[in-house]
């Protein structure tokens, strides 16, 4: 009953709750799918754990190195005791619909003595692996890859793991995700949609947002195709019909924010505020009229800069792909945007584009260290979307607040507290709309001046780092000089909502 009320309210605003409570926007075109389709070219013949070496006798954690960070939302993901400093991926994509082959150099700092380096990897075949150029024992156990050197790696040392692997990436299905995630492909090309734990489908990695790292990608593909990834193009070289594209980025990134796309994409360049570089990649069959929708990117960046402070990353743009999920994803510096959004309601496109852009400040540059804190991403991007919709004359802020209120009142009972949603509900409407409403309450509580100072300091002080709800509460208290414990307790975690502060 309650969720029907919410669904009805959200239909008005262009969103609806799917059966499992995940956020779902009204389809931009005529599609009616409620969740991302499974990858069309899903290949089930390439099973998991295609390791070339024999498995070890004992369980991996028996090796004495943690196999997870223990995040209740994604229990197997990541590993404690390691800090990945950088990933340098050399990836060959002869055919975007086919298998990949790659070598990755992972520079790691051991935060404790390590008997083995444990990473996440879903399917694919590990062909060889070394640590500091020495051979290691390779073993697989489910989605866990373990590299065991002859002798333990001492605490506080830095080392480089080199892993060569190949295969047809299998999408990941997980209750924490709003749909099928991983390396996905369509006729027009491949792209990545990984949040929260789809990166392990194409990259052995410490696949948890608490371990941000630097990334560089060299992608080699047939010269008639375009390859694009997060960051800026540093080098492009064509030899024997194959082009290698090297992308680098100067800011740290969480694994779930990777974007790598290969296919029939056109690159479009533009200039943003203060001369910043904007570049988009769009499916070749996008019409001229649809392409002009991308022109508003600069105005959106400019608007958010006045509210949130300078754009925090190297570059920005949209990857407009034939992704069948009706979900856009804030992949760092290069948002994944389903082409259907540019072919449908232009106001809806504008809102979604603003939402994903706002994530570059809230989610990408600063990243929650646990998935339970996902409201620090989604509630902030939703509130930013409301501010843009108001500014652009799409929807007055009061109307968005009213919708948020209805969700917030019902949502906590269904999906759990905003800052600690049930593990299967991290992308529920309560985190988006209910949390947007909480931020509006905070704005009324502390006033515009301190509220926007808080948003700016939040982004600036933590750029490149991980954050928690506790950090946000502490900064709010610092800026306002008042004790906001009760406010946050009530608005984020209590069973019932008070009226909006009347200030
Ligand atoms: N973070 C996305 C948003 O902006 C939602 C999302 C989560 C998503 N996981 C995804 C989108 C996987 C596409 C694919 O709201
Ligand atoms: Zn979002």
Image (cartoon, rainbow, N blue to C red):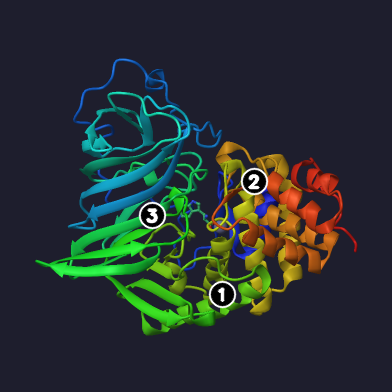
Mark 2 or mark 3, which is nearer to you?
3
Is residue 335 shown left or right of residue 129? Answer: right
In space, the residues marked 2 and 1 are separated at their CA atoms by 25 Å
Residue shown at 62% from the left, 76% from the top: 303
- The local crowd at label 1, few if under 14, some if 14 to 19, many if 20 or more residues have their Cα within 10 Å, is some
Describe the element under mark 1 as helix, strand or loop: helix
The residue that appears at 37% across and 29% down in the rendered structure is 153
Does residue 179 lie above or below 69 as drawn?
below
What's the CA distance linking mark 2 and mark 3? 23 Å
Query: Which residue is nearer to you in this view: 236 or 133?
Result: 133
Is label 1 in contact with label 3 (beta carbons under 8 Å)? Answer: no
Considering every residue shown, the one lying at the far top of the view is 57
Question: In the rendered image, which quarter contains the C terminus?
Answer: bottom right
Q: Are marks 2 and 3 in contact (CB under 8 Å)?
A: no
Residue to which mark 2 is pinned: 468
Measuring from the top left, give residue 64's x and y in whole percent: 42, 21
Q: Is residue 2 visible from the viewing direction of this image?
A: no
How far across and how far down the image is residue 472, in percent? 70, 51
Instruction: Check residue 425 in the rendering and tell me which mark sits there, or answer none.
Output: none
Q: Hey, which quadrant is residue 150 in on the image?
A: top left
Q: CA distance from mark 1 to mark 3?
A: 24 Å
Kindly identify which numbered label has been placed on residue 301: 1
Q: Horizontal placement of 211 versus 15: left or right?
A: left
Judged from the image, the secondary structure of the residue bearing numbered disc 2 is loop
Return the residue at label 3. 215
User: Disc 3 on helix, strand or loop?
Assistant: strand
Mark 2 nearby-residue class (10 Å; few <14, some 14–19, many ≥20):
many
Instruction: Return the residue nearer the eye: 54 or 24.
Output: 54
The residue under the point 60% across, 64% down is 14
In the image, taking residue 345 as reference, residue 305 lies left or right, namely: right
Q: Earlier in the sequence, mark 2 or mark 3?
A: 3
Residue 46: x %, y % from top left? 23, 38
């Amino acid at each position: 009953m309650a969720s029907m009320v919410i669904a009805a309210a959200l239909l008005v605003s262009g969103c609806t709750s799917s059966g499992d409570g995940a956020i779902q926007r009204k389809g931009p075109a005529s599609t009616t799918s409620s969740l991302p389709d499974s990858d069309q070219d899903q290949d089930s013949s390439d099973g998991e754990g295609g390791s070339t070496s024999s498995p070890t006798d004992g369980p991996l954690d028996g090796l004495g190195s943690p196999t997870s960070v223990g995040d209740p939302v994604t229990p197997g993901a990541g590993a404690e005791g390691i800090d990945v400093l950088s990933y340098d991926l050399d990836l060959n994509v002869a055919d975007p619909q086919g298998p990949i082959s790659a070598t990755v150099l992972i520079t790691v700092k051991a935060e404790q003595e390590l008997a083995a380096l444990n990473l996440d990897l879903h399917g694919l075949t590990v062909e060889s692996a070394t640590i500091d150029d020495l051979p290691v024992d390779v073993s697989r156990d489910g989605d866990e890859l373990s590299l065991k050197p002859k002798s333990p790696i001492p605490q506080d040392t830095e080392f480089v793991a080199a892993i060569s692997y190949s295969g047809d990436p299998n999408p990941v299905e997980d209750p924490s995700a709003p749909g099928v995630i991983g390396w996905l492909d369509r006729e027009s090309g491949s792209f990545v949609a990984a949040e929260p734990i789809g990166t392990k489908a194409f990259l052995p990695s410490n696949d948890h947002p608490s371990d941000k790292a630097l990334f560089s990608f060299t992608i080699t593909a047939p010269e008639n195709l375009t390859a694009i990834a997060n960051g800026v193009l540093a080098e492009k070289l064509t030899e024997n019909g194959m082009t290698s594209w090297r992308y680098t980025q100067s800011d740290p990134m969480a694994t779930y924010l990777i974007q790598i796309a290969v296919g029939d994409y056109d690159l479009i360049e533009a200039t943003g505020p203060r001369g910043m570089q904007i570049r988009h990649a769009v499916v070749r069959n996008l019409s001229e009229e649809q392409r002009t929708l991308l022109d508003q990117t600069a105005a959106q960046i400019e608007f958010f800069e006045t509210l949130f402070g300078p754009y925090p990353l190297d570059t920005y743009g949209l990857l407009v792909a034939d992704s069948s999920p009706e979900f856009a994803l804030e992949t760092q510096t290069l948002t994944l945007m389903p082409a259907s959004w540019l072919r449908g309601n232009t106001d809806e496109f504008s809102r979604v584009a603003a939402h994903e852009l706002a994530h570059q400040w809230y989610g990408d540059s600063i990243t929650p260290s646990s998935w339970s804190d996902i409201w620090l991403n989604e509630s902030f991007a939703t509130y930013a979307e409301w501010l843009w919709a108001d500014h652009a004359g799409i929807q007055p802020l009061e109307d968005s607040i009213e919708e948020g209120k209805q969700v917030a009142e019902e949502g906590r009972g269904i999906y759990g507290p905003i800052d600690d949603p049930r593990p299967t509900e991290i992308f529920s409407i309560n985190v988006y709309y209910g949390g947007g409403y909480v931020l509006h309450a905070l704005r009324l509580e502390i006033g515009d001046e301190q509220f926007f100072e808080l948003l700016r300091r939040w982004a600036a002080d933590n750029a490149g780092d991980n954050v928690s709800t506790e950090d946000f509460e502490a900064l709010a208290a610092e800026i306002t000089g008042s004790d906001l414990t009760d406010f946050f307790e009530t608005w984020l975690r209590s069973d019932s909502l008070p009226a909006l502060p009347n200030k």
